[in-house]
Each structure stands twice: as structure tokens, then as C-alpha cells.
Image (cartoon, grey):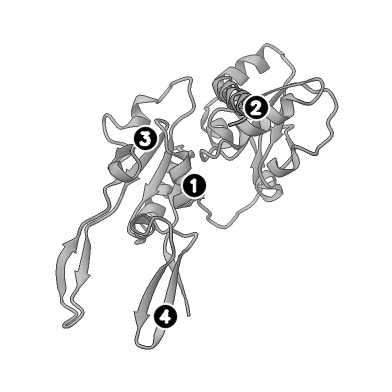
Amino acid sequence: MNSSILRCCLCCAAIGFVASALAITPAEVQRKLQAREKITFVDLRSRAAFQTGHIPNAINIPAFLVPQKELPPLGLVVAYDAGLGTETAAAAAVTLSAKPGITALPLEGGFVAWENAQSASSTRAAGLSAEEFPIITYDHLTMAQSNNVVLVDLRKPRAAASAATGAQAAAQPLTDLAAEFPRAKITRSPFAGSAPTRTLAGSASAPPLLVLIDNGDGAAQQMARTLKANGIKRFAILAGGEEMIARKGQPGLERTGSSTIVRQPHPSGTTNSTR
């Protein structure tokens, strides 16, 4: 590799590390605000997500617009994404800090961590809205897995039907989550006595990202409602659940007579069938 290219790669890696290392927690932001420090919040999510709820006085600049956006000197900027492990805020903070008069830090845990902080406030659109849950894809989870990602295993053993008789055969084994996602923590319940969500309660750090995994039977949605009722908002449902893990995120093919059905992950965590 050319030495100049190598130096450039190392420099980029170092910048990325610094942005990640300098992430600021919601609690630290609150202390700065209480000390009357001036902070400009930049919301990196879509316009629709911003309108649903955001940090008060934040300006909405979707992440893909950050590189070409001209901004005045803003001083200290706290950039935040949805908090689903994409590292969008870390990359945007580097880009923002390269602009004159701006020092940007990514918000650890994103918007959901901000909402989880008891002392934090946010704007929410008034009125009723359709029930929606954040979704994470298999590919996204593979990239996002870390010590601060907790897989909540809600799967039940799958029964296989005999092709000849339709009778239930021996249960098919479930995918080994520890082998599939070696850097993530795993729990059967986020409310277990020593579960990661319990051990981090009251911590200054952002709460872990809970990824709910089921068999596509609605267990993830039910757990999501329970988490929301308990004030836990940093979670996402794995689209397609166990089926997508078994297929490593790839769409599957099924033969039914002379037809072929392509099964794609559905945002609800189930699957869609298209002929």
C-alpha cells in the first residue's frame, strides 16, 4: 500500500476513534445546560422522525446533508441520531467539527437515550399516533453489535412439519445467537435480576440498545409495549426475527406447487410473501 494512502487511512481511523471516545452522555449535556453553557443540538434523523419528537431547539439536518451544509460558527454542537447503533452521529460529528467555528460531539445513545434520561425533556407531537416500533435489520445488527447491544431472546423452539403427513416432527434447533453475534450480550428477559438493563440502571452512560428477537409470532411487539410501559425506550425489533438470522439476512425461496414465493422481512418483524 502507498505510504501516503496508509497515512490517510490511519488518520481517518484515528479521527473516528476520537469522535467515538469523545461521545457525550445525556447526563453530561444536562450538567452543561444547567451551567448555562451554550449548546446547539443537531438532529441527524429524517424530517418525519424529527417532527415526531426531538430535543428542544434542535435543528434538523439529515445525516446525508451534513457534508454539503453551510453553517455559521455554532460553537459546541451535540449531534444525535436515533440511537440504534449506526454510528451516524460519530461520523457526522467529525464532519461538523471540520467546519469553521464548530466543535461537535456525538450524543451517546442518541435520541432514545436522551428520552430515557429522567431529567431530560423532549418535544413530542400532540395527539394520538399509530403504534410504531423501531426496526433493525440483520445486516445493521451485524455491524452494530457491541458490549452495549443486548439481544433479548424471545424465541420459542420451532416445530418442523413432516412433508408427507403434515404431522409435527422434532423441533428444529434455533440459531446460536452467541455464535452469530459474539460481541453482543444475550438475555432471556430484560427484567431478570442481573440483566444488563438492571445493572446499568442509574448509570451515567447511555442505556444499552435492546434488540428484541422472536419467531415472527408477535412476542417482540408485546415485549416492546412492556418496555415502553416501564419507561425503557432504547430498543429495536429485529426484522424477520429468527428466520432472518437463519438466512443471514437473505430473502428465502419457497416452492409451492409450480409457484415460487420470495419471503422478505416485514417491518413488523414478520415476513411478507410475494409471487
What kind of residue is marked 2? Answer: Cys
Q: Distance between the residues labelled 1 and 3?
A: 14 Å
Seen in the image, is 180 located left or right of residue 72?
Answer: left
**According to the image, label 3 marks what residue?**
183
At x 67%, y 27%, the residue is 94
- Where on the picture, by quarter, is residue 76? top right
Between 64 and 221, the one lying in front of the other is: 64
Vertical position of residue 215 compared to residue 43: above or below: below
| Disc number for residue 140 | 1
- Return the disc, 1 or 4, that comes first in the chain's sequence: 1
Question: Of label 3 and label 4, which has the lower sequence position?
Answer: 3
Residue 172, located in which quarter of the rendered image? bottom left
Which structural element holds mark 1?
A: helix
Tell me which amino acid carries mark 3.
Arg
Residue 50: x percent and y percent?
Answer: 68, 44
Kindly report which numbered mark, 2 or 3, lies closer to the viewer in this rendering: 2
Q: Mark 2 points at which residue?
A: 8
Badge 3: how crowded within 10 Å, few (<14), some, or many (20+)?
some
Q: Which of marks 2 and 1 is nearer the N terminus?
A: 2
